[in-house]
Image: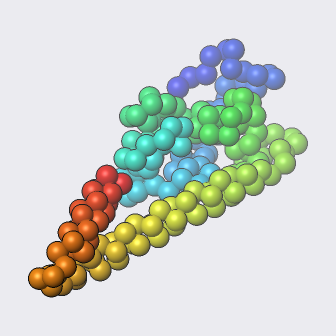
Amino acid sequence: MNRRRAPSELHRGLPPEVFARIVERVPMTEAAARYGLTLSRQGTCCCPFHSEKTPSFKVYPGTGGFYCFGCGAGGDVVTFVEKFLNLSPAQAARRLDADFSLGLFDSAAPPDDSWKQSKAERERSEQEKESKDWQLVLELRRLHRIPPPPATDPETYAQAKALEEYLEYVKETR
């Protein structure tokens, strides 16, 4: 997972040793958490680089790398920050140095709190989805408690059953 950086990636005179030190000192799991990803116990989550419903993004704590089985993105912690924050390799190295207080550079990069906003937005959308799911479940429970129709009103019962089937379909396709 710790890929070697090509000479073309050594932007602004950063030697490969800087990248190696960052990869050694910043665990990928901590970087993922710092930038708003919530990993499962197995080290997986939904990939931040493409939209998906099933987690395919895997963090390997032993090697300090990551790989997405959905889009094929992979690499070390510097590559992750590069892609996640849309930075050059040197900017990503400086950002990691500043965010994790490594002290590898003389002048620290200004702190970037944009990850907090994206994490808050992601949590808000998850809460909205969960709220809608609960509303759907409660409506289904209400519909399951509908008593059989009186002999004079089969149309109302048929409409309620059709709505119940539709809501079950919606629940399964989410």
Q: Determine the image quadrant of residue 33.
A: bottom right
Q: Residue furthest front?
A: 152
Q: For the C terminus, which image quadrant?
A: bottom left
Q: Residue at x 67, y 15 (%)?
A: 7
Q: Determine the image quadrant of residue 10.
A: top right
Q: Residue 21's x, y, as percent?
A: 64, 37
Q: Residue at x 62, y 40 (%)?
A: 84
Q: Residue 72's x, y, as percent?
A: 44, 29
Answer above or below: position of 92 versus 146: above
Q: Is residue 110 left or right of residue 162?
A: right
Q: Residue at x 62, y 58 (%)?
A: 121
Nearer to the camera, 124 or 43: 124
Q: Residue 132's x, y, as percent?
A: 45, 67
Answer above or below: position of 139 versus 76: below
Q: Residue at x 81, y 23 (%)?
A: 12
Q: Residue 27's x, y, as percent?
A: 55, 48
Nearer to the camera, 82 or 152: 152
- Answer yes or no: is residue 18 visible: no
Q: Is residue 41 left or right of residue 112?
A: left
Q: Is residue 154 left or right of residue 66?
A: left
